[in-house]
Image (cartoon, rainbow, N blue to C red):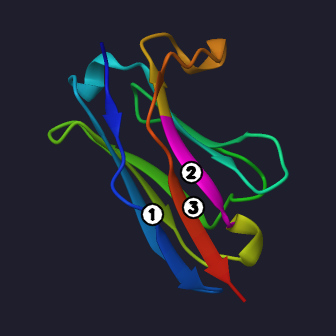
Amino acid sequence: QVQLVEPGGGSVQAGGSLRRSCAASVYSYTLNCMAWFRRAPGKERQKVAHIDSNDRTSYSDSVKGRFTNSKDNAKNTLYLQMNSLMPEDTAIYYCAADRYACYLGSWRYWGQGTEVTVSS
């Protein structure tokens, strides 16, 4: 069973930065796709970014240019660097992963989620 562990959330003022991390209980190179999702208050869950086994990344339009998704296989850890944060980025952020390729959109493994609050 794969476990994904996310340390506690954070809060910041608009324009600030935060970094999320997600530690996998298995070698991260065995997870062909790792991703970040978020659920804002009153909204549906949204995929923010993903990274594949070749370190190719993809981002939603709402975060492109502001967020950077990366992976450190030596630490089995996924990161999300969030810059130029806006109040609309306030949400619970979840990491997710699967051994299948990203294009299949399969997410069998999930972190517990951490809250990010951006104040204006």
Residue 7 spot, x, y in % from top left: 33, 55
Residue 92 located within the stretch drawn in magenta: yes
- Judging by the rendered image, the residue that carries numbered circle 1 is 9
- Whether residue 68 sits left or right of residue 119 in the image: it is left
- Whether residue 86 sits left or right of residue 22 in the image: it is right
Residue 95, placed above or below residue 97? below
**Which is nearer the N-term, disc 2 or disc 1?**
1
At label 3, the amino acid type is Phe
Q: Are marks 2 and 3 in contact (CB under 8 Å)?
A: no
Q: Residue at image x 68%, y 58%? A: 64
SS category of the residue bearing label 3 = strand
- Judging by the rendered image, the residue that carries numbered circle 2 is 93
Residue 80 spot, x, y in % from top left: 46, 55
* C-alpha gap between disc 2 and disc 3: 13 Å
For disc 1, the neighbor class at 10 Å (few under 14, some 14 to 19, many from 20) is: some
The quadrant in which the C terminus is found is bottom right
* C-alpha gap between disc 1 and disc 3: 16 Å
Residue occupying the far right of the picture: 42
The region drawn magenta spans: 90-95
Q: Which mark identifies residue 67? A: 3
Residue 19 spot, x, y in % from top left: 42, 65
* C-alpha gap between disc 2 and disc 1: 9 Å
Q: Are marks 2 and 1 in contact (CB under 8 Å)?
A: yes
Q: Which mark identifies residue 50? A: none
Residue 112 located within the stretch drawn in magenta: no
SS category of the residue bearing label 1 = loop
At label 1, the amino acid type is Gly
Q: Residue at image x 57%, y 21%? A: 102
**Which is nearer the N-term, disc 2 or disc 3?**
3
SS category of the residue bearing label 2 = strand
